[in-house]
Amino acid sequence: MKYCTKCKILSDDKTEKCSVCGKKVISNPSHFSPVKIVTANGFELERIRAALEDADIPYSYNESIRDTGIQILNSAPPENCDVFVPLSAYRKAEETLIGIGALSEEKITDANEDSFAKAEKEAEEEELPPEKARTVRILSGIGFLIILALTVWLADFLFELIKNIFTA
């Protein structure tokens, strides 16, 4: 699977340049690289957002580059928005959007299944188990309090030093 860093789209392994912008595509994108899954507007965009939130799939959306921008004049929502999901959640997002009818099966990415499986595995390995996550949060809180105490102590020490210099 190849990935265009400008357009945020996937292409097959044989492609050397993006079909949209002509930029050279990269191999082996990161599992958290944002990938454009669909372009939508209005009610359809809200349906997609709700479905992705219900499936616990992280997403973002931006106004499409091809958008005319006329909605600025009348304060309407953007006409077209590109919806992006992380590469590791791409297959789950595709299945979700096909399930609600927002994506047709003809538009499914023909990228290598092994690449998606690898990205999903990397994302799972990166997540901490709940016990370790709790420990990290506690240690981070203690570390923050220590840094805060040291900062206050240093400020008091410097203030006393400067006060002694000017009062002597």
Image (cartoon, rainbow, N blue to C red):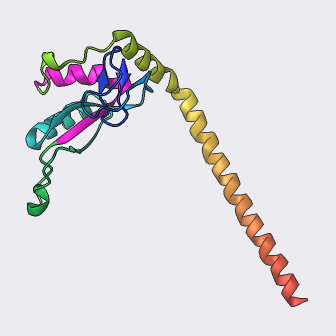
**Of residues 107 and 134, the one drawn nearer to the viewer in this rendering:** 107
Q: Is residue 101 left or right of residue 145?
A: left
Out of 106 and 143, give the one closest to the viewer.
Answer: 106
Q: Residue at x 8, y 61 (%)?
A: 74
Quarter assignment of residue 33: top left
Q: How many numbered marks have been drawn onto this rendered protein structure? A: 0
Picture coordinates of residue 158 (x, y %)?
79, 72
Q: Where 49 sits versus 113, above or below?
A: below
Q: Position of residue 82 (x, y in %)?
A: 22, 38
Q: Residue at x 41, y 19 (%)?
A: 120
The residue depicted at 15 percent of the width and 21 percent of the height is: 98
* Residue 95 is a magenta residue: yes
Instruction: Assign the C terminus to one quadrant of the image.
Output: bottom right
Q: Quadrant of residue 43?
A: top left
Q: Residue 64 in the image: state x and y as whole percent.
A: 20, 43
Q: Is residue 119 left or right of residue 96?
A: right
Reply above or below: 27 against 82. Answer: above
- In the image, the segment drawn in magenta is 81-101
In the image, is 145 to the left or to the right of 98? right
